[in-house]
Structures are given as C-alpha cells and as structure tokens.
Image (cartoon, rainbow, N blue to C red):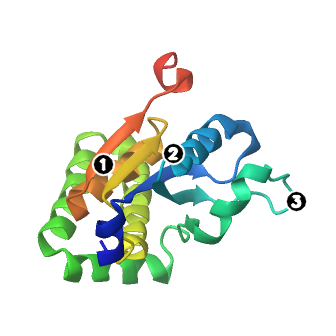
C-alpha cells in the first residue's frame, strides 16, 4: 500500500471475473461502481477479453484503463510470471503450485482448470504488485474462484467469493 492510500484509508480490492466488461453481468458492474462511490478502489482482473465489437456499458468505461487480462495459458508470459512469483513469494509460489498439483492429482478431471488457474493467479500476482491491493474477491464459483483461491495462497491476501444461481443450482 502506498503512503497516500494509508492516509486516505482507501481500500483496494481486486475483482476476479470471467470477462470484463460483460453486458450480461451488469449486476457485477453496478456493484463495482457502487463500491467505488463508497471509496473502495476496484482493480478488475479478467480471465477473458470481450469481443471488441461487443457493446460496453457506460459505467464500465472508468474501469477499462485498469483491467488486467490474463495471457494465454502456456504462453511464454505464463512461465515468466510463475518464475517471478516463486522469486517474489517463495513460500506462496511453492504453496500455490503444490495446491494446484495436489488437487489435480486427486481429481484429474480438474487438472486443466488448476493449470489455467495457476497461470492466471501468477499473472495477476505480478500485475497487482505495488497496487496496494488488500483483498481479493471472485464472482462465480468457477474459474474465477479457483484463481482467487490460488492467488490468495500465493500472496497471503484475504479472499471472498460471490456465488450466483449458476453456481448453486447446477451440478
């Protein structure tokens, strides 16, 4: 956290999202905008870039310059991010990697999600360095939750999760 953040008491929260912006998830955008009006700085971290031709809600525009998008899994950037994470957070990097590996071995059907999640968590860990983020929040109990769990393991930040009907009323 920067000294100026401490002086103002500004809370900074990284929002882990499938896609941002997304017209179908305006409810999340409204939540983010309301939190900002209350003095919470939101740093969106999106797993998927939207279609460039998709419409963008007017309230999303202030967030666009600070959205962090993950690179493709298996890209050279992913390897660099993993190495940088292990150097910056030796215990967290090892623990996050071990957590992803252990879960993949217990449930091989989840190995792909854990691999993608670990790559995204490593990338977001690097991108959020120096941003003063104090908390992680994921929307949906799918890949954003996996990324949030691994990112919290790596960085030691607190983590919360919003579950929605899709998460609760499906298998």
Mark 1 residue element:
helix
Cα separation between marks 3 and 1: 32 Å
Residue 102, position as x, y percentages in the image = 20, 50
Which residue is painted at 32% across and 53% down in the image?
135
Q: Is residue 65 left or right of residue 171?
A: right
Mark 3 residue element:
loop
Q: Earlier in the sequence, mark 3 or mark 2?
A: 2
Cα separation between marks 1 and 2: 22 Å
Which residue is painted at 21% across and 83% down in the image?
87
Residue 122, position as x, y percentages in the image = 36, 69
Which residue is painted at 79% across and 58% down in the image?
51
Q: Nearer the viewer, residue 75 or 60?
A: 60
**Disc 3 to disc 2: CB gap under 8 Å:** no
Q: Earlier in the sequence, mark 3 or mark 1?
A: 3
**Disc 1 to disc 2: CB gap under 8 Å:** no
Farthest residue toward the top? Answer: 169
Location of residue 141 with respect to 99 vertically, above or below: above
| Mark 1 or 2: the one toward you | 2
* Figure quadrant of residue 97: bottom left
Disc number placed over residue 94 in the picture, else none: none
Disc number placed over residue 53 in the picture, else none: 3
Residue 128, position as x, y percentages in the image = 40, 71
Which residue is painted at 29% across and 67% down in the image?
6
Query: Which quadrant holds the N terminus?
Result: bottom left
Q: Nearer the viewer, residue 64 or 145?
A: 64
Q: Which residue is mark 1?
A: 149
Mark 2 residue element:
helix
Count numbered badges in the picture.
3
């Amino acid at each position: 956290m920067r000294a100026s953040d401490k002086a103002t008491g500004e809370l900074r929260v990284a929002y882990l999202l499938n896609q941002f912006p997304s017209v179908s998830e305006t409810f999340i955008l409204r939540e983010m905008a309301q939190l900002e009006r209350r003095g919470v700085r939101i740093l969106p971290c999106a797993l998927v870039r939207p279609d460039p031709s998709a419409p963008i809600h007017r309230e999303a525009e202030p967030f666009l310059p600070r959205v962090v998008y993950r690179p493709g899994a298996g890209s050279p950037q992913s390897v660099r991010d993993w190495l940088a994470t292990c150097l910056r957070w030796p215990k967290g990097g090892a623990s996050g990697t071990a957590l992803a590996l252990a879960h993949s071995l217990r449930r091989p059907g989840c190995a792909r999600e854990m691999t993608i999640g670990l790559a995204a968590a490593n990338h977001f860990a690097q991108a959020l360095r120096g941003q003063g983020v104090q908390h992680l929040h994921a929307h949906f109990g799918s890949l954003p939750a996996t990324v949030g769990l691994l990112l919290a393991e790596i960085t030691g930040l607190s983590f919360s999760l919003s579950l929605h009907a899709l998460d609760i009323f499906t298998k």
